[in-house]
Amino acid sequence: MNFQVTVLKILVSYPGGFAVMADLKRDMAILATSGRDWAERTKRLAARMPHLDIFSQGLVERESGGWKITEKGRTVLEFLEARPGTNQAIEVPLTESVAAPLPMLRQPAERARRRRERCERRRQARERARANAS
């Protein structure tokens, strides 16, 4: 689960975008234990803006006992949730390194080899388990 994106999503759901820390912690705990769907969704959203930092970029402000999402935070969240490939232009006034999406990097050959080996070991273990069960 991506903490930065989750905080933005939680705050935007509250009236006025403000939530006290107890509510934030409760909602985070609920989402953290809700299953893979939420974790995968926040990871996918965070990948659209890899250098996201909600406090240093002014997306969230600390206020008396809680946090509040700013207009800039709402804009960034809209950008993150926009479907890739749409021609929707959203102004995101952030640092230059965040404004341009990064190209996908190829997996290193060593990592790909280790993954193939793990898959092969799992397949062999399944076959042994089936043979022993018979």
Image: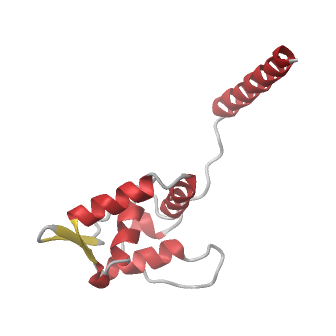
Say whether residue 51 is left or right of residue 80.
Answer: left
Image quadrant in which you'd find residue 77: bottom left
Against 2, residue 114 (above or below) is: above
* Relative height, residue 50 to residue 132 (above, below): below
Q: Where is residue 76 shown, x and y percent of the image?
A: 41, 75
Residue closest to the eye, 72 or 12? 12
In the image as oriented, which residue stretches furthest toward the front?
134
Q: Is residue 14 visible?
A: yes
| Quarter of the picture holding the C terminus | top right
The residue located at (43%, 53%) in the rendering is 32
Report the residue at 62% width, 73% height from top: 84
Which quarter of the figure has residue 13? Answer: bottom left
Q: Position of residue 87 (x, y in %)?
A: 62, 84
Residue 15 location (% of width, % of height): 30, 83
- Where does residue 10 sit, x and y in percent of width and height? 37, 69
Q: How many marks?
A: 0
Residue placed at 65% from the left, 41% from the top?
107
Image check: 52 left or right of 38? Answer: left
- Asked if residue 120 is positioned above or below residue 2 in the image, the reply reads above
What colour scheme has been applied to the protein in the rendered image? secondary structure
**Quadrant of the image occupied by residue 106:** top right
Residue sitting farthest toward the left: 64
Is residue 93 shown to the viewer in this render?
no
